[in-house]
Image (cartoon, rainbow, N blue to C red):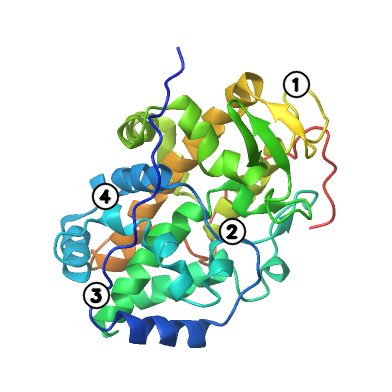
């Protein structure tokens, strides 16, 4: 039997730490301004559940560094939703959460980013986080964004686009919700129908992260994660069991959930495992005779074989 959510809305933003406004303004000026597309990614329960997986896999050094950077009483799980809760206070930050890659493209290319997307911003914040000489407020902000953006990079509708603002313009009826859209279905709708809440989602993610095949999830780099999300986005636009594309006004329900809830769950599990590796690499001192996690481009790195395009969608030239 499918599990159901108890619902509930997002909390109000937490109190901003001293000096936050100065650094937020500096970040907005330094990192630039973005496009008007909606920037919110996974819903609150999704971010928190994925971060629980990551938090459980931190090294002692990384765990201590996280505690030193966050506010008293604030956990890494709490920090995972900070970027959404405070997005209005950082002008232009909406575009940092996504990248528009046509669903007909074979793969992501740097031209899709134009220097201002989840790929470029994640790398910038990762560098700040890994710099022990950077001021604490900057590293604190970077930590919160690294957590959030790694997870957003795994949200298919924050990558694949069909000239509809990542599915925001595809109006749908989904179970009892007669006024939603494809983006919202993937942010939280599927998880709401499939699980009772954050803890229930987290249990499912931990189960996936413990499987032997999860060891392969740390291969590749951020662009590979984006390409995985692109392939999942192609499936998201498809009417289950057909090669037809979802159109505004469609009603979707159990068939769509059965086809796509497992994809959502695995995307979040992968995000949690990979986030732990990124944080361990950035916050733990290097050890002798160890190979660094291959998350950001490194010469000679073996990449996973890209998945084939979804049936019914003809890839363009990448």
Q: Is residue 16 left or right of residue 167?
A: left
**Residue 308: image location, x then y, percent:** 72, 39
Mark carried by residue 17: 3
- Mark 4 or 2, closer to the camera: 4
Residues at marks 2 and 3 touching, judged by CB atoms closer than 8 Å: no
Residues at marks 2 and 1 touching, judged by CB atoms closer than 8 Å: no
Q: CA distance from mark 2 to mark 3?
A: 33 Å
Closer to the camera in the image, 177 or 194:
177
Which residue is identified by label 1? Answer: 241
Q: What element does badge 3 sit on? A: loop
Quadrant in the picture for the N terminus: top left
- Mark 1 or 4, closer to the camera: 1
Q: CA distance from mark 3 to mark 4?
A: 22 Å
- Mark 3 or 4, closer to the camera: 3
Mark carried by residue 223: 2
Q: CA distance from mark 2 to mark 1?
A: 29 Å
Quadrant in the picture for the C terminus: bottom right
> Quick check: can you spot residue 132?
no
Q: Residues within 10 Å of mark 4 (few under 14, many from 20)?
A: many
Q: Residues within 10 Å of mark 2 (few under 14, many from 20)?
A: some
- Mark 2 or 1, closer to the camera: 1
Which residue lies most toward the top here?
A: 1
> Quick check: can you spot residue 96?
yes
Mark carried by residue 55: 4
Q: CA distance from mark 1 to mark 4?
A: 37 Å
Q: Is 96 situated above or below 108?
A: below
- Mark 2 or 3, closer to the camera: 3
């Amino acid at each position: 039997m499918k599990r159901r959510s108890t619902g509930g809305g997002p909390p109000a933003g937490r109190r901003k730490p001293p000096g936050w406004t100065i650094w937020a303004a500096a970040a907005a000026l330094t990192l630039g301004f973005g496009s008007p597309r909606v920037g919110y990614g996974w819903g609150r329960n999704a971010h928190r559940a994925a971060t629980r997986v990551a938090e459980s896999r931190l090294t002692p050094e990384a765990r201590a560094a996280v505690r030193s950077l966050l506010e008293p009483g604030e956990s890494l799980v709490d920090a995972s939703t900070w970027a959404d809760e405070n997005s209005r206070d950082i002008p232009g930050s909406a575009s940092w959460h996504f990248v528009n890659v046509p669903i007909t493209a074979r793969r992501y290319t740097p031209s899709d980013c134009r220097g201002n997307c989840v790929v470029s911003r994640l790398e910038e914040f990762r560098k700040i986080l890994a710099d022990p000489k950077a001021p604490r407020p900057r590293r604190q902000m970077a930590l919160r964004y690294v957590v959030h953006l790694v997870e957003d990079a795994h949200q298919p509708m924050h990558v694949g686009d069909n000239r509809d603002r990542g599915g925001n313009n595809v109006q749908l009826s989904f179970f009892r919700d007669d006024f939603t859209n494809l983006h919202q279905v993937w942010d939280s709708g599927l998880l709401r129908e499939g699980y009772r809440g954050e803890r229930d989602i987290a249990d499912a993610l931990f189960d996936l992260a413990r499987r032997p095949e999860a060891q392969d999830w740390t291969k590749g780099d951020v662009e590979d994660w984006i390409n995985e999300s692109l392939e999942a986005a192609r499936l998201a636009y498809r009417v289950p069991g057909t090669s037809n594309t979802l159109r505004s006004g469609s009603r979707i329900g159990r068939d769509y959930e059965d086809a796509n809830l497992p994809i959502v769950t695995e995307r979040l599990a992968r995000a949690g495992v990979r986030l732990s590796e990124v944080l361990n690499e950035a916050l733990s001192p290097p050890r002798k005779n160890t190979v660094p996690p291959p998350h950001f481009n490194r010469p000679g790195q073996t990449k996973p074989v890209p998945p084939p395009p979804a049936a019914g969608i003809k890839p363009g030239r990448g």
